[in-house]
Image (cartoon, helix red, strand yellow):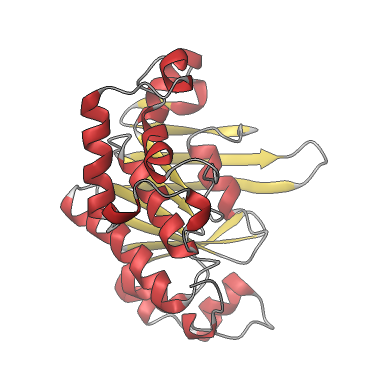
Amino acid sequence: MLEVKNLTKVYDDGTVALRNVSFTVDDGEFLVVIGLSGSGKSTLLRCINRLVEPTDGSIIWDGQDVTAADPPDLRNIRRKIGMIFQHFNLVKRSSVLTNVLSGRLGYVTPWASLLNRFPAADREAAAKALERVGLTEQTRKRASELSGGQQQRVGIARALMQEPSIILADEPVASLDPVLAHSILGNLERLNQEDDITIICSLHYLDLVQRYATRVIGLRDGELVYEGTRDEIRSMTDDQFKQIYGEEAERITAGSIGGEA
């Protein structure tokens, strides 16, 4: 179980990104975080693995205080927390295989990774990860040669190489069209269901949330303003919607997304 307790993040310029946020995530959940841009979604995900240092509060994972972990313990924790980024975060000039193998950086020496000397078992695992996301034929291509949807699947394969217990997905489909959005979220759903990997994913569009989430939390101006199950999000009232997105907001579906092929 992941427990977030009274989490607050204030940036150096005084911006309050999160304010006293508390919730729990059971093992095996597909939790979706919703809210406007600037509501604190990305900061929340990055606080969980301490890519962003919280200002106050605690994050407890399986009884271990992530926020208090020293560098060696944090390195071990991060091995089991995969991260998928909105803009893919790939080394574009490197091959697809090399990008996927970088998911093992927490397990090999810096010297070995610098020389791209990964064990045969890691290379075999990378091939299997690419097969699972349908990219076997793209292994030797440069990442820059792939479409946006393919690059995000490389990101999923890279996260899978960590043998993660949790995957944090920060707006993973924001730059993709609706068909590709469902493809990417379908891959994450399979990892959730087949590998029992907990997924914590930030999304904008309610129809995607309603399709994939097992539970939902909503942020507004850094505060937790909504918690609901899949059934509850499907029957969300206009008042609840406006509580998250504001009085002027209108419901928009993923069919309105434009993006890369």
The answer, for residue 206, to whether it is visible in the render is yes
Is 51 located above or below residue 241 in the figure?
above
Quadrant of residue 31 within the rendered picture = bottom left
Q: Quadrant of residue 232?
A: bottom left
Answer yes or no: is residue 213 visible. Answer: no
The residue depicted at 47 percent of the width and 48 percent of the height is 142
The N terminus: image quadrant: top left
In this view, the residue in front, 132 or 44, is 132
Q: Quadrant of residue 98?
A: top left
Q: What residue is rendered at 26% in x and 29% in y?
A: 122
Q: Is residue 244 left or right of residue 209?
A: right
* Image position, residue 133 (x, y; %): 28, 56
Residue 147 appears at what percent x and percent y? 48, 63
- Taking 256 as reference, is 32 above or below it? above
Extreme front residue here? 140
Residue at 54% x, 32% y: name it: 50
Residue that appears at 59% across and 78% down: 242
88 sits left or right of 193 in the view:
right
Q: In the rendering, at what x and y percent does residue 38 appear?
A: 68, 59
Q: Position of residue 207 (x, y in %)?
A: 41, 79
